[in-house]
């Protein structure tokens, strides 16, 4: 019986093992991605790269490939498919869809902690948001990419990210910011073989200097960009198209310096370049610039109009909205004295293109001409004011984001290095104690340093004879204002503002732009334009600066006033709270009112 029992148990064990193996093999067959399947999706991927096929067909093939890639659960295949899908969607100008698939790429890279593909995704985010003219979002994406590249010590990607950021700042008219960013980028790339992007950074710096009227510096950086293309290899690396763009910029620099004939000769050489003629975007740019400069050099030049209209037609043909804005502005200037109705037509076309593209810089530029050519511009004046403020806010925010990122990157990079070196708990504790000690010493040092800075600012403040930020009625009648406001209305507003300052009307609490403008017999849009133009400030900033100036003067001259509480002083000079007063006082002077009073009493 025992022998029989053993045989039965052995038989059951064998059967169990066979069944388990069969089930396991079946599961393996279900989940294993066969070579045949791999070959098939590889074929689909190759088809998505065939240029002779339509974009819709190529997108269909890559979608099929992606399905197989996800079934395979292989990250390398999934990354490859998502990169191809987003690229094709970008070529098809389906930028919103490209952003959606880029999100899938980014999320997977984060899940896998793959910094390489995180950077790839952030680059694509930056590109597609820029194509959608979401420039602030694009700038943030490139900034995040720069942050990652700093952590991974990837100097090439750091430099390229800064180039992308500088390009966006240039598009937003922030030439000072773009120059600073691009110079930082040069530091990363100047000792590398990345000639293409280094040349791009030199070009951005050149453009920024030209727009800031620093023509000597603009010429130097333009020559540096061109000098990188010293042979056929380097020219091919930089790109012949980019070299031609640099030469176009050189012509504009020459023209800005008054060297019109040299500029025109250079543009004519570019116009006849067969390589440039194949690129309709750049060819139209050269035609438009050449027509414009020939007109500037000689108002009666008979070829100018023909070239300007040819450039416009070419840009219409390829639907280059950005180029159309420039062409329409050039034609506005051309017809301004010859035919004002035509000039207005082109100015409004430029305004329309700028709104379609969401280009804040060109909206302001186009409105500047519309103000000069149109009778009733109340609506346009409001748009101008809103756009001006929005552009200022975006540029300021972009600068702040980059400044914070630079600081955080250095801090995170240091922490990353330290953490990798820490082996055990005792070492960590020793490091923390050392760090706290250093921070304590640094804190004490920083406190005394700040005290010295405050003291210096206090002395400088005492040395100023005038703290009020006034508008003089004898100020030059600026073109930007005259375009929207008559000379008589402007003089009236300037007189009212001077009386407002002389009579210390700014000390009244709860002043708002609408009521102030109404008391002047005007409207808030006109008042805002005047203050923006003559003081480069908003209405609220202008009033707050006057209040702070008054507070400084009175605190120095009136010992009794110094005995008041900060809250009482704030109320006396028109602020509703001591916190707002202290904040504005510090912003204007670099010190707090309590410190200022304390030093005056010593």
Image (cartoon, rainbow, N blue to C red):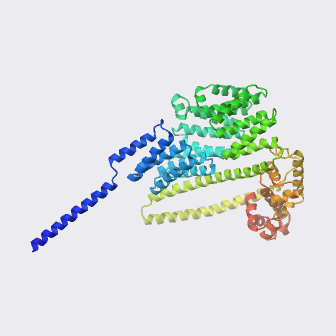
Query: Which residue extends farthest bottom?
Result: 1
The quadrant of the picture occupied by the N terminus is bottom left
Horizontal and vertical percent position of residue 46: 42, 40
Residue drawn at point x = 22 percent, y = 65 percent? 16
Residue drawn at point x = 52 percent, y = 54 percent? 413
- The answer to whether 17 is drawn above or below residue 149 in the figure is below
Q: Is residue 73 something that shows in the picture?
A: no
Horizontal and vertical percent position of residue 174: 68, 46
The quadrant of the picture occupied by the C terminus is bottom right
- The answer to whether 268 is drawn above or below residue 134 in the figure is above
Horizontal and vertical percent position of residue 301: 76, 26
The answer to whether 268 appears left or right of 548 in the picture is left
The answer to whether 449 appears left or right of 372 in the picture is left
Q: Is residue 78 something that shows in the picture?
A: yes
The answer to whether 572 appears left or right of 175 in the picture is right
Choose between 331 and 508: the one closer to the eye.
331
Residue drawn at point x = 85 percent, y = 56 percent? 517
Horizontal and vertical percent position of residue 225: 60, 35
Number of residue marks: 0
Choose between 496 and 406: the one closer to the eye.
496
Choose between 470 and 321: the one closer to the eye.
321
The answer to whether 504 appears left or right of 330 in the picture is right
């Amino acid at each position: 019986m025992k022998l029989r029992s053993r045989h039965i148990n052995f038989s059951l064990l064998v059967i169990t093992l066979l069944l388990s193996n069969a089930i396991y093999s079946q599961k393996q067959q279900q989940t294993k991605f066969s070579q045949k399947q791999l070959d098939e999706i590889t074929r689909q991927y190759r088809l998505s790269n065939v240029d002779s096929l339509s974009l819709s067909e190529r997108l269909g093939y890559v979608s099929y490939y992606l399905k197989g890639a996800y079934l395979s659960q292989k990250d390398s295949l999934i990354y490859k498919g998502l990169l191809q899908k987003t690229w094709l969607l970008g070529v098809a100008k389906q930028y919103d869809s490209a952003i959606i698939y880029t999100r899938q790429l980014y999320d997977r890279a984060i899940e896998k902690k793959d910094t390489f593909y995180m950077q790839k995704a952030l680059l694509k985010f930056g590109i597609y948001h820029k194509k959608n003219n979401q420039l602030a979002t694009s700038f943030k994406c490139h900034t995040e990419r720069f942050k990652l590249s700093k952590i991974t010590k990837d100097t090439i990607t750091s430099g390229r990210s800064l180039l992308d950021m500088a390009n966006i700042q240039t598009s937003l008219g922030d030439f000072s910011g773009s120059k600073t960013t691009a110079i930082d980028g040069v530091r990363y790339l100047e000792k590398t073989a990345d000639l293409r992007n280094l040349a791009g950074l030199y070009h951005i710096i050149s453009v920024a200097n030209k727009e800031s009227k620093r023509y000597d510096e603009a010429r130097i950086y333009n020559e540096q960009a061109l000098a990188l293309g010293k042979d056929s290899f380097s020219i091919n690396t930089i790109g012949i198209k980019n070299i031609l763009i640099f030469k176009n910029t050189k012509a504009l620099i020459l023209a800005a310096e008054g060297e019109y004939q040299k500029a025109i000769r250079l543009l004519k050489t570019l116009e006849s370049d067969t390589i440039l003629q194949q690129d309709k975007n750049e060819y139209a740019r050269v035609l438009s610039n050449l027509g414009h400069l020939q007109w500037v050099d000689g108002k009666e030049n008979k070829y100018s109009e023909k070239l300007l209209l040819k450039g416009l037609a070419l840009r219409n043909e390829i639907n280059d909205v950005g180029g159309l804005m420039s062409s329409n502005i050039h034609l506005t200037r051309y017809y301004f004295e010859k035919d004002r109705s035509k000039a207005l037509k082109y100015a409004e076309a430029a305004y329309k293109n700028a709104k379609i593209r969401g280009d804040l810089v060109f909206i302001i530029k186009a409105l500047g001409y519309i103000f000069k050519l149109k009778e009733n511009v109340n609506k346009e004046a409001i748009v101008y004011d809103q756009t001006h403020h929005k552009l200022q806010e975006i540029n300021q925010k972009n600068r702040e984001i980059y400044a914070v990122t630079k600081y955080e990157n250095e801090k995170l990079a240091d922490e990353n290095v330290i953490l990798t070196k820490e082996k055990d708990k005792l070492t960590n504790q020793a490091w923390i104690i050392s760090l706290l000690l250093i921070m304590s010493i640094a804190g004490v040092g920083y406190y005394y340093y700040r005290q010295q800075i405050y003291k210096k600012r206090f002395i400088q403040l005492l040395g100023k004879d005038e703290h009020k930020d006034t508008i003089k009625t004898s100020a030059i009648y600026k073109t930007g204002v005259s375009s929207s406001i008559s000379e008589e209305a402007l003089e009236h507003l300037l007189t009212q503002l001077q009386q407002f300052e002389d009579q210390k009307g700014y000390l009244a609490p709860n002043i708002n732009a609408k009521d102030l403008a109404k008391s002047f017999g005007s409207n808030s849009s006109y008042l805002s334009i005047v203050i923006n133009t003559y003081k480069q400030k908003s209405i609220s900033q202008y009033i707050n600066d006057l209040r702070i100036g008054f507070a400084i003067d009175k605190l120095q001259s009136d010992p009794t006033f110094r005995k008041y509480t900060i809250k009482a002083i704030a109320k006396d000079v028109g602020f509703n709270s001591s916190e707002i007063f202290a904040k504005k006082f510090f912003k204007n002077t670099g010190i707090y009112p309590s410190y200022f009073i304390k030093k005056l009493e010593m």
